[in-house]
Amino acid sequence: MSPSRPSQSRSSKARQPARAAPARPVGGEDTPTTARVAVVEKRGKFLVAEPFFGPGPRLAISRDSRYDVGDLVLVSPQISGRKNQGSRVKVTRRLGKPDVARDVIEALMLDRGLTRGFEPAVTRAASASSELPIAVGLSGGRRDLRRLPTFTIDPSSARDFDDAISAKQADGGGWAIWVHIADVSAYVTPRDAIDREAYKRATSVYVPGAVEPMLPQELSNGACSLMPDQDRLAVTVEMLIRGSEVVSASFYRSLIRSDKRLSYEQVDQVFAGVERAPGEWGKGLASARAAARALEQRRSAGAALMLESAEPDFEFDRKGNVVGVERVAQTESHRLIEHLMIAANEQVARFLEARKIPTLYRVHERPEVQSVERMIEQLASLGVPTPPVPGGALTTQQAAEVVGEASRLLADWIAARDGRGARALNRIVLRSLKQAYYDDRNRGHSGLQLTSYCHFTSPIRRYPDLICHRALLSAVSGDEREPESSWVTQAGPHTSARERQAMTIERDADDVARCFLLARRLAEAGAQRRSGDGVAGFSGTPTVFEGEIVGVIGAGAFIVFGEDGEYEGMMPVRRMRDDWWELNEHGTALIGTRSGGALRLGDSVMVMVDGIDAPRGRVDLVPADLYSDSE
């Protein structure tokens, strides 16, 4: 798992379909106080706004040529000027159709409180700031590194490039590594309009086919983005790596020019010998690869977590329909960037802590002993090799080390089984851990087994990184004011909460996209749609999927299915009529009380789709041998 890139672990949830409430008079306590998404429907002579993502009252709206029956719309409260008339709702925006994936995902973002744009004052300020002459940057002692061969490595669809790399073999052995990070602080002044909006958002939100950026695109995709063949302002962490250790580090503002924009796929092709890497940037890539491998050896030798993950990458057609998905797994190119970013983040954190400069640390506290002991019991109950647990009462440090060793044994065991069981078993390990957060007090990062760690390498999309930039520059260049301690203390809980909200939105948007793609695939296979209770079901010739159990609760089993495990749904025990199923004591299997059969985490199972509730990202499954298309 990569601390330098957004981690978006997903899990489906058993959510109940929304049942519409009867139409009620406009006004009173049922009128929404904030904007919400609805579908325009006709009830008799009237048009009503039917809540789309959850239960709620139908609210009367006025007829308007801007929208029609069946449209997705955003409605907001409208205060009447007359006394005792209550509130009214008005349609503020037409969003599209509820059967178009891109429109529904856009609606989801708005329903969750994202603004999908910036106030004109913020946009104007960003436009003016983006015109800062690059030459001005050199007047303050900024180092000119434009002749240093430099490259970026990002997803092929990326437009905001936070980080760039330069590397070469060092005199006397080892490698000189330069990690260049976009100098957002040069364009965003503390407490100005851009900064206030960035703080409020705290993070960019990435969903299939769209992004809600933390900064206006004039900065995020323009002046701050380290695009190739463009002079860009940066903050550089220069490190000397020998063996597997960073033996020295220095920090300064710089002016860089990226020579090559690389994608992860391209770099993997170079590493596989399929593509060439000519010129000086190619030599730099080879040095960066060697340095990252050395850092990885150090991390592997410790008790750091070793969990691989894969993220979905959805493909849309021009009409906004989801037409494909690819699970993007971590490869060597991803790990190269990950290890170099971790090293830079650690060095910045150690520097700031030593000088007691107020900043935000990325804290991952040690796990609870009881959680780790349960994890070991769960893995053992599934026949997974586990590390020996020290006798007596475990300390939290020992518990963290046990988790790290368990993750490595698990990774080897999964690799020997061609990846089978990876999702379910990795989730067991992850559930034993505490959630990482931002705090002004350094409490270490247990997952990485580092005593000091911060987020510094993505200031375009994370506000805590911008705080770290200002803290660092207040010490090394003196042209930034040291962040106020009391303000940094308040920023920790705020940015942590916004991060959690963003992760929830991203996960739910992925679930929505999966549902639309699954419905498309079933329709292509000849299934006929039927609807009821807000859920689209299917009849006709059924499609059988081989799935893998990734979660179990008393109510049923969560199953991933599809050619590459791209879909996920729930199979409730009430639909498994051949037995009475109960959850075992370890929470790793459903046991049939009559047959003695077991549905264990990681087991294969044949299923069929019974219903899809796309707005809520829910898929209902039934066992293949119990399916009946007669309703």
Image: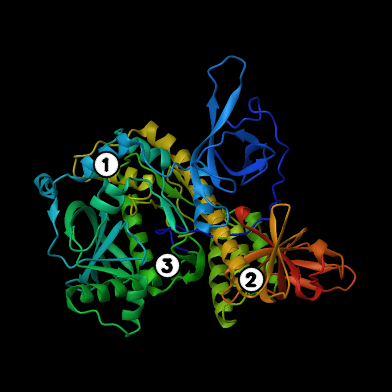
Q: Disc 3 or disc 1, which is closer to the eye?
A: 1
Q: Hey, which quadrant is residue 228 in on the image?
A: bottom left
Q: Mark 2 points at which residue?
A: 522
Indicate left or right for 388 with 588 as reference. left
Q: Which amino acid does label 2 sit on?
A: Leu
Residue nearest the viewer, comparing 423 with 274: 274
In the rendered image, residue 123, in percent from the top left (x then y), is placed at: 30, 40
Q: What residue type is labelled 3?
A: Arg
Indicate left or right for 446 with 131 as reference. right
Query: Rounded to the nearest whole Å, what is the CA distance between mark 1 and mark 2?
Result: 46 Å
Q: Residue at x 86, y 67 (%)?
A: 577
Q: Which amino acid does label 1 sit on?
A: Ala
Work out which quarter of the rendered image holds the C terminus and state it: bottom right
Visible in this render: residue 378? yes
Q: In this view, does 602 lie above or below 193?
A: below
Query: Rounded to the nearest whole Å, what is the CA distance between mark 3 and mark 1?
Result: 40 Å
Q: Is residue 252 above or below residue 187?
A: below
In the rendered image, residue 430, in percent from the top left (x then y), is placed at: 58, 60
Q: Name the residue under label 1.
A: 126
| Secondary structure under the numbered disc 2 in the rendered image | helix
Q: Mark 3 points at which residue?
A: 299
Q: Disc 1 or disc 2, which is closer to the eye?
A: 2
